Amino acid sequence: MENKSNPKALIPIGVFLVLYLGLGIIFEYVLKIPMGFYNIPIVVVFLIALCVACFQNKELSFDKKLELMGKGVGDKNIITMILIFLVAGMFVGVVGRSSASSVAYFMLSIIPVQFAAAVLFVVSCFVSIAMGTSVGTITLVTPIAVAVAQTSGLGVALCVGSVMGGAMFGDNLSFISDTTIAACNGQGCQMKDKFKENFFIALPAAIITVVLILIISSRYDVSGTIKNEYNLVQILPYILVLVCGIIGMNVFIVLILGIVSGAVIMLATGAFKAVDLLSNMGAGVSGMFETTMVAILVSAICALIAEHGGFVALLNGIQKVFKGKKGGQLGMGLLVGAMDIATANNTVAIVMANPIAKQMSETYGISNRKAASILDTFSCVFQGIIPYGAQMLVAISAAQSLGAGVSAFDIMPFLLYPYLLLVSSLLFIFVIPEKSKEESAIPDPVDDNDAVIKD
């Protein structure tokens, strides 16, 4: 079914952005509420936007709108994404997050202290890949980074910035990251394909980051030793999930293997008691509630917007500005980046951008895995540098709780990895051609007037 272009159909998205961004700015910078953006119930704001969408398009009855929303939420990719969210939450609940400090202190015990900031970056890369959460990684590793800075003489901002950069590296590549799950299922590509696409973009940025951290570290007068207890056995479930994901096993099988192996290891090592196993699983699943509800509500809103012609209008507007396949890829990256700046949440930004990006892929001839890679990469770039994002706020809070006075603007010059990831992404768009078997099956880009939204 071909829908006519109707910019007014995008009003629900505008309502969400105005309410969320406006209230976030007031809470954070006017009322000075700590973690102001994250005191706003995002599910409630999306419900308001959904109500606005329901009041539009009076040609359709409310029952017909409910039917459209049901089709949107019931899409195979949405259901798959929700189930993966829940199982991934269960995995994190079982395995816990105790391995982060073990990995950090193990590497710090065998590597000279002058390389400590680079070690913190590498450790954060591994931990965030294993855990699938940048915020969780920053929460766990930042106290170690502050202790390293205070013990060794390295700058606190450098150490914390290194942790944040490594956390975003893993968030972008992890098989159990909600951003990866959202991008892959939204664009209909396998996680291993998106991982391969992202890896060769992220790796050069990470290598250069390590080199720059070492150069900056050489300017400090470093001394002291860093030692603490660690238990490396508990990281085995994470390694199992990572390896199985890379070789292409079904994500549900991978996560089930991780849950079973994690339960056995955690019980055997005494990390928790058998009676706590189910409650830990439940806690992990509950932690995915908000993300799951956002996916459901956004799917319902997007179904109504698409039917009313909003995405046709947006796509036509994008085509007028961004020409050709390379321009389309840049437009897709800037689209999800703008969503992230407005929501301060890279998962929400990807979920919101998914349906538009899917249409852009068809219009510009962009492979599914390339689209998923762009959405995840650009959202991580912007999320990693905005001063009001959860990553930055959690890092500052953790550092200040340990007596380290550091601000967002102290840390931002040392967010080397997100900046370099942006440069690497642009190089892969404009300089290095995409190599994909999918491309031969993708139709040539259509003209502006041919862009349609399929019902």
Image (cartoon, rainbow, N blue to C red):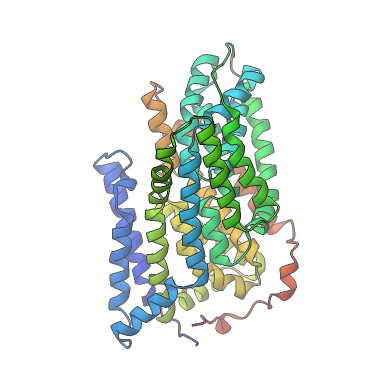
Which of the pair 274/193 is nearer the observer?
Answer: 274
Q: Position of residue 105 (x, y in %)?
A: 57, 23
Q: Is residue 300 above or below residue 131?
A: below
Which of the pair 222/151 is nearer the observer?
Answer: 151
Drawn side of residue 34 relative to residue 410, left or right:
left
Q: In this view, does 150 lie above or below 215?
A: above
Q: Report whether residue 416 is seen.
A: no
Q: Residue at x 66, y 20 (%)?
A: 110
Q: In this view, does 12 lie above or below 92?
A: below
Task: Give the farthest residue toward the left.
Answer: 31
Q: Is residue 151 above or below residue 266?
A: above
* Quadrant in the rendering for residue 309: bottom left
Q: Where is residue 127 in the image (x, y as percent from the top left)?
A: 56, 37
* Quadrant in the rendering for residue 169: top right
Q: Report whether residue 215 is seen.
A: yes
> Total label count?
0
Task: Give the farthest residue toward the top.
Answer: 224
Q: Which residue is drawn at 48% across and 20% down?
A: 147
Drawn side of residue 192 relative to residue 182, left or right:
right
Drawn side of residue 136 relative to residue 279, left or right:
right
Task: Give the farthest residue toward the front.
Answer: 274
Q: Position of residue 156 (x, y in %)?
A: 49, 24
Q: Which residue is drawn at 52% across and 54% down?
A: 179
Q: Where is residue 269 in the image (x, y as percent from the top left)?
A: 53, 30
* Quadrant in the rendering for residue 306: bottom left
